[in-house]
């Protein structure tokens, strides 16, 4: 039984041909492998995964809807993916996610309001993206006891209405 999947400092092509079969994998760490292409739907086969790390690669497109069925997923880190114009999470993303880091993914547009359904979220980072529009009410009206939000902006196209209650840290620096 494999509890951790890790590929380090190798050059792999991440694509549809890569089929993840090991349902017992707990942590998928594919960081810093120079992976290219889109994130494969087959990552949704990692039924018991609690963490997926995809940082430091050259990924693009969207996060597959298949990740939404990973009910044990607590941590998703996708950052530093180059100039890939990444898209936000699918609307079916798990409500059990504690940490979501989408830093430096060239994400543009507004923060989706349906992310407010992720009631376990306590650590959120959208640093160094091209976000615009109003910060959704679910961020401003967080009912969680503690929530760390990091939205470092490369351009200040976001607006926020104060006060924000229950948020421990909110950063807008560049």
Image (cartoon, helix red, strand yellow):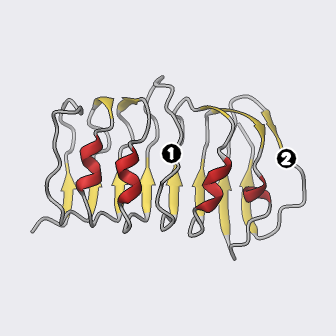
Local crowd size for mark 1, using a 10 Å CA cut-off: few (<14), some (14–19), many (≥20) = many
Q: Residue furthest bottom?
A: 145
Q: Residue furthest top?
A: 83
Local crowd size for mark 2, using a 10 Å CA cut-off: few (<14), some (14–19), many (≥20) = few
Could you tell which of marks 1 and 2 lies nearer the N-terminus? 1
Of circles 1 and 2, the one toward us is: 1
- Label 1 element class: loop
Q: Residue at left 38%, top 37%?
A: 56
In the image, residue 10 sits, relative to residue 20, either above or below, namely: above
Task: Report the front residue among 72 and 126.
Answer: 72
Q: Residue at left 17%, top 49%?
A: 20
Q: Quadrant of the N terminus?
A: bottom left
How many angstroms separate mark 1 from mark 2 (CA)?
22 Å
Find residue 169 and report its image quarter: bottom right
Q: Residue at left 74%, top 41%?
A: 173
In this rendering, does residue 45 appear at all? yes
Task: Report the front residue among 106 and 133.
Answer: 133
Q: Residue furthest left?
A: 1
Q: Which mark is residue 124?
A: none
**Disc 1 designates what residue?**
89
In this rendering, does residue 29 appear at all? no
In the image, residue 153 sits, relative to residue 166, either above or below, namely: above
**Disc 2 designates what residue?**
160
Q: Is residue 32 left or right of residue 102?
A: left
Indicate the position of residue 114 as horizontal and vertical percent values: 63, 52
Q: Quadrant of the C terminus?
A: top right
Q: Residue at left 66%, top 66%?
A: 147
Q: Is residue 141 left or right of residue 26?
A: right
Q: Is residue 122 left or right of residue 82?
A: right
Indicate the position of residue 6 as horizontal and vertical percent values: 21, 52
Q: Is residue 64 left or right of residue 171?
A: left
Find residue 126 and report its image quarter: top right
């Amino acid at each position: 039984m494999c509890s951790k999947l890790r590929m380090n400092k190798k050059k792999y092509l991440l694509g549809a041909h890569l089929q993840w079969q090991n349902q017992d994998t707990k942590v998928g760490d594919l960081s810093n492998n120079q992976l290219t292409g889109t994130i494969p739907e087959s990552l949704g086969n990692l039924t018991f995964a609690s963490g997926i790390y995809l940082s430091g690669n050259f990924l693009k497109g969207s996060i597959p809807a298949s990740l939404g069925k990973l009910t044990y997923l607590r941590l998703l880190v996708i950052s530093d993916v180059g100039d890939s114009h990444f898209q936000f999470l699918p609307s079916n993303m798990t409500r059990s996610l504690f940490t979501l880091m989408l830093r430096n993914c060239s994400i543009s547009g507004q923060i989706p309001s349906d992310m407010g359904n992720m009631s376990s979220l306590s650590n959120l980072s959208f640093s160094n993206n091209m976000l615009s529009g109003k910060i959704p009410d679910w961020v401003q009206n967080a009912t969680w006891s503690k929530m760390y939000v990091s939205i470092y902006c490369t351009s200040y196209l976001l607006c926020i209405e104060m006060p924000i209650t229950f948020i421990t840290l909110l950063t807008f620096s560049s």
